[in-house]
Image: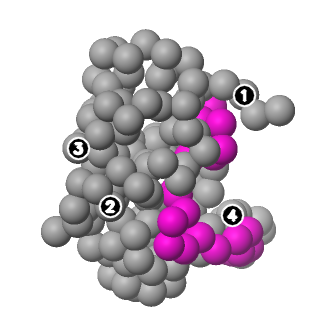
Amino acid sequence: MIEETTKQELLKKQKVFARLNHQEIEILATLFREQDIKSGTTIVTEGEHVDSVYLILEGKADVRHVTLKDGQLNIQSLTTVGQGGSIGLSETGFYSLTGLRTATVVALTDMVVLRLSIAAFNGFALAYPHVKEMVSQKQT
């Protein structure tokens, strides 16, 4: 079981949450749930609705763009993310402005992640309206 202080430290390292004060970080950290993911597991699939974001505590994942052309499956590795990284977050907000996943992410190793459901985040944002504005800004 991950300690709340560890969650808080990881949140503080995410640029998207940099403007949150200490109390807001503490509250947001309580909304994240620890999850173990086995190597080879598809964590998110391109085109699906964004229902959560993830912060990586341990392990490594491959971010992929998958296409089907002329009956051929084409998998292009875009990048890898590891400890301290995130899935579904950019520096300025949620990665997908459409509400759909923009890539498929597959665990390359066994992983431990912190998962935040969008429903839980929206509840948090209702209590702290400036948060919703903060994470919905377009990247420049």
Residue linked to disc 4: 65
- Classify residue 85 as left or right of residue 77: left
Query: Which of pointers 1 and 3 indicates the residue nearer the eye?
Result: 3
Gap in Å between the C-alphas at discs 1 and 3? 27 Å
Q: Residue at x 35, y 31 (%)?
A: 24
Classify the position of the C terminus by image quarter: top right
Which portion, as a residue range, is magenta? 73-98
> Is residue 12 among the parts visible in the rendering?
yes
**Residue linked to disc 2:** 6
Mark 2 / mark 3, whichever is N-terminal: 2
Badge 2 amino acid? Thr
Counting residues from the N terminus, which is met first, the one under dot 3 or under dot 4?
Answer: 3
Q: Residue at x 50, y 73 (%)?
A: 83
- Asked which secondary structure carries label 4, the reply is strand
Front tag of 4 and 2: 2
Decide: is 48 above or below 65.
above
Quadrant of residue 122 in the image? Answer: top left
Q: Which residue is mark 1?
A: 138
Verify CB contact (< 8 Å) between mark 3 and mark 4.
no
Q: Picture coordinates of residue 97 (x, y %)?
A: 62, 31
Identify the amino acid type marked 1: Lys
Q: Residues within 10 Å of mark 1 (few under 14, many from 20)?
A: few
Q: Amino acid at mark 4?
A: His
Q: Tell me the mark number nearer the camera, choosing from 1 and 4.
A: 1
Q: CA distance from mark 1 to mark 2?
A: 29 Å
